[in-house]
Image (tube, coloured by chain):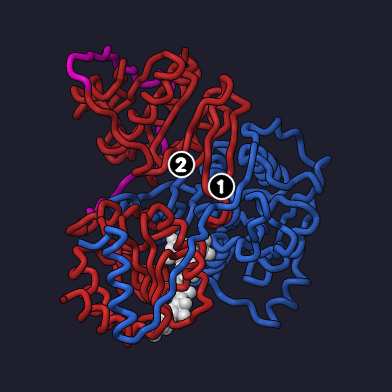
Chain colours: A blue, B red
């Protein structure tokens, strides 16, 4: 029966980001959430376990506050969690995150058959951790899957590329990243949340793992994207709609 | 002086990367190398578009995917130490680039949308937080690596009479063969027209009650010579329209003269894909819908009332 490892991240909910005066970002009223793409990754792991048996171990890297994310992820059906926690583990370079996860998988998770990652994280969306992790662990990688199945030690995945759908196979253990269309993530109920509190979580501190090396990129600035436009509003009455069409013509965007 | 490598699987993205590459290299001097599959198809063009060298990769065994080139490219890059490696931010590029970066132990800027030199360093911009913000990064390691957002840089104007050196990379002596095998390949139905090239895009959102109502949106689009696009719920959840028509973070970015969102709320993940439109218009019955803060013109009202009137007005 397969042992599936899922990677997930507790991220800033972008809905609450505001533009600060001066063009920066105002994080003062932000809330956090389990990255949307990772909900699909967890759902897929749980779906396979429900069909084939086995266990699902979730793994995340983050500051101590991300413990909420571990509980959220467990409420979605995972069996156990590994939480690599340190106040410094915020906005790590993907290579650093991968170094930590790879060490934890090798030394603290035990043999596994499949690693599932979301296609990217909902905050920085670098889409690097999955493919990099496969290289770090020396296993095969299939990115952007829209359908997966396991049978007799082989992963079969359908993946979506530009203009073509490829069906591929890979020997296990392997890593797959999944697109949101692969499934519809469940919404955990009260019972799921209560059960999540009873599931085992292994917390690993910085000292339990080796060095990660320095960051490979340096962030120089994060600016709010300029989106505001001065909207001229029109009503829905016939005369208003005609005025709307005239306004479009005046701007030269209608022939 | 800088040595820049490009790896891409399609002609269109190779041209765009050559456009960006030439811009970067002309500022500091250096050379551009294009790595490509062993058939070398289309390589005659690359010299005119700015390539100084073409490297042909060794043939892949049957059933192996493009990613199987990774070990050879990584070994060559480790040996020859190019300063910059660019790949397109296509599905293939977004898988291969991080795997190459991991092998080369270097940093990667994913889905870069702008590039510039700043005091001898390369700076790149990328979109973060679902489109709400732009992050600017610089590189602390070499090679500098990036995947480049499609349709962001223009192909260079070809220059006749340029030539490029040609060389072949041998297979790795002790290469391990990857386990991933392609067992089936299906061409996706090509859409008749390309949303990213359209002058007018009319996007249908969740405000539509049923699939048949798309006819209204289609009629508006055809009257203004435009194409229909949609928000993600319509393509991914309701499956009313194909995935290729989803606009936004997980879909395509469009740059039309005019974008009209019909029953579209204006969430950042969608709007990040229409930011490049010259004029943004909206039809929404909720006057507080976020789209109005990001639009130039908007009809506040029920689309089932507004669209028939709009169709009449456009026919005049
Ligand atoms: C990680 C992630 C990635 C995403 N990527 C994308 C993406 O690439 N593209 C994308 O589009 N979305 C994406 N989304 C989803 C996005 O956040 C929004 O949920 C989506 O864009 C909303 O679509 P909508 O505007 O059609 O629907 P809704 O938000 O439901 O809005 C419907 C609007 O229609 C209006 N309306 C209803 N009835 C009428 C009527 N009769 N007349 C006029 N107006 C009416 C309502 O007032 C409302 O404003 C992503 C989300 C996440 C989390």
Instruction: Work out whether residue A48 can be spotted.
Output: no
Q: Residue at x 30, y 66 (%)?
A: A248
Residue positioned 27% across, 58% down in the render: A252
Instruction: From the viewer's perspective, tell me whether residue A13 is left or right of residue A84.
Output: left
Q: Chain of mark 2?
A: B
Q: Residues within 10 Å of mark 2 (few under 14, many from 20)?
A: some
Locate the N terminus of chain A by quadrant: bottom right
The secondary structure that most of the magenta stretch takes on is loop
Q: Quadrant of the C terminus of chain A?
A: bottom left
Vertical placement of A199 versus B76: above or below?
below
The residue drawn where x is 38% and y is 38% is: B88
Query: Residue A159: where, in percent of width, then height?
Result: 37, 54
Numbered tag placed on residue B113 in the rendering: 2
Does mark 2's beta carbon lie closer than 8 Å to ligand 1? Answer: no
Do the residues marked 2 and 1 share a common chain? Answer: yes
Q: Is residue B252 left or right of residue B143?
A: left
Q: Position of residue A100 (x, y in %)?
A: 69, 42
> Numbered disc 1: what chain?
B
Q: Nearer the viewer, residue B205 or A255?
A: A255
Query: In front: B117, or B306?
Result: B306
Is B68 placed above or below B230 here?
above
Q: Which mark is residue B88?
A: none
First along the sequence among labels 2 and 1 = 2
Label 1 neighbourhood size at 10 Å, few (<14), some (14-19), many (20+)? Answer: many
B222 relative position to B148: left or right: left
Q: State the mark number for residue B134.
A: 1
Q: Position of residue A232 (x, y in %)?
A: 44, 70
The image quadrant that residue A133 belongs to is top right
State the extent of the magenta-drawn residues as a range: B159-187
Secondary structure at badge 2 equals strand
Residue A32 belongs to magenta span: no
Query: Where B22 sits versus B62, above or below?
Result: above
């Amino acid at each position: 029966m397969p042992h599936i490892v899922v990677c997930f991240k507790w991220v800033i909910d972008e809905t609450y980001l505001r533009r600060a005066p001066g063009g920066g970002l105002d994080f003062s009223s932000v809330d956090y959430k389990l990255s949307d793409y990772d909900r699909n990754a967890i759902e897929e792991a749980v779906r396979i376990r429900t069909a084939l048996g086995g266990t699902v171990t979730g793994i995340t890297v983050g500051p101590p506050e991300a413990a909420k994310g571990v509980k959220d992820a467990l409420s979605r059906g995972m069996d156990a969690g590994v939480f690599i926690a340190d106040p410094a583990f915020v906005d790590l370079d993907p290579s650093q995150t991968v170094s930590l996860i790879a060490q934890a998988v090798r030394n603290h998770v035990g043999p596994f058959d499949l690693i599932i990652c979301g296609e990217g994280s909902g905050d920085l969306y670098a889409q690097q951790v999955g493919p990099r992790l496969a290289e770090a662990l020396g296993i095969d990688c299939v990115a952007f899957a829209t359908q997966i199945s396991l049978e007799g030690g082989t992963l079969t995945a359908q993946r979506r590329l530009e203009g073509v759908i490829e069906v591929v196979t890979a020997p296990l253990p392997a890593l797959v990243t999944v697109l949101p269309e692969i499934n519809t993530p469940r919404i955990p109920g009260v019972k799921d949340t209560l059960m999540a509190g009873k599931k085992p979580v292994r917390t690993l501190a910085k000292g339990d793992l080796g060095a990660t090396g320095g960051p490979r990129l340096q962030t120089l600035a994060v600016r709010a994207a300029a989106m505001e436009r001065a909207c001229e509003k029109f009503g829905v009455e016939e005369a208003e709609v005609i005025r709307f069409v005239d306004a479009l013509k005046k701007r030269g965007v209608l022939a | 002086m800088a040595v820049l490598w490009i790896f891409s699987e399609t002609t269109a993205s190779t041209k765009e990367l050559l456009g960006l590459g030439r811009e970067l290299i002309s500022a500091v001097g250096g050379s551009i190398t294009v790595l490509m599959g062993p058939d070398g198809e289309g390589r005659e063009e690359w010299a005119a578009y700015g390539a100084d060298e073409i490297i042909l990769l060794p043939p892949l065994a049957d059933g192996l995917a493009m990613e199987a080139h990774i070990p050879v490219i990584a070994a060559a890059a480790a040996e020859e130490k190019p300063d910059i490696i660019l790949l397109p931010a296509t599905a293939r590029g977004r898988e291969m680039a991080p795997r190459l970066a991991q092998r080369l132990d270097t940093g990667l800027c994913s889905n870069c949308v702008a590039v510039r030199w700043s005091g001898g360093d390369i700076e790149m911009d990328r979109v973060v937080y679902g489109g709400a913000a732009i992050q600017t990064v610089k590189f602390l390691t070499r090679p500098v690596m990036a995947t480049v957002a499609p349709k962001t840089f223009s192909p260079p104007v070809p220059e006749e009479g340029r030539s490029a050196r040609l060389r072949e990379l041998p297979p790795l002596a002790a290469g391990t063969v990857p386990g991933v095998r392609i067992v089936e390949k299906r061409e996706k139905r090509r859409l008749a027209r390309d949303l990213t090239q359209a002058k007018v895009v009319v996007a249908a959102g969740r405000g539509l009650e049923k699939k048949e109502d798309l006819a209204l949106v289609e009629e508006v689009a055809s009257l203004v010579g435009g194409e229909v696009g949609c928000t993600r719920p319509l393509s991914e959840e309701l499956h009313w329209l194909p995935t290729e028509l989803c606009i936004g973070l997980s879909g395509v970015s469009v740059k039309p003269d005019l974008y009209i969102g019909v029953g579209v709320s204006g969430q950042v993940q969608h709007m990040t894909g229409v930011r490049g439109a010259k004029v943004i218009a909206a039809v929404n019955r909720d006057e507080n819908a976020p789209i109005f803060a990001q639009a130039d013109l908007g009809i506040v009202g029920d689309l089932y009332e507004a669209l028939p009137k709009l169709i009449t007005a456009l026919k005049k």
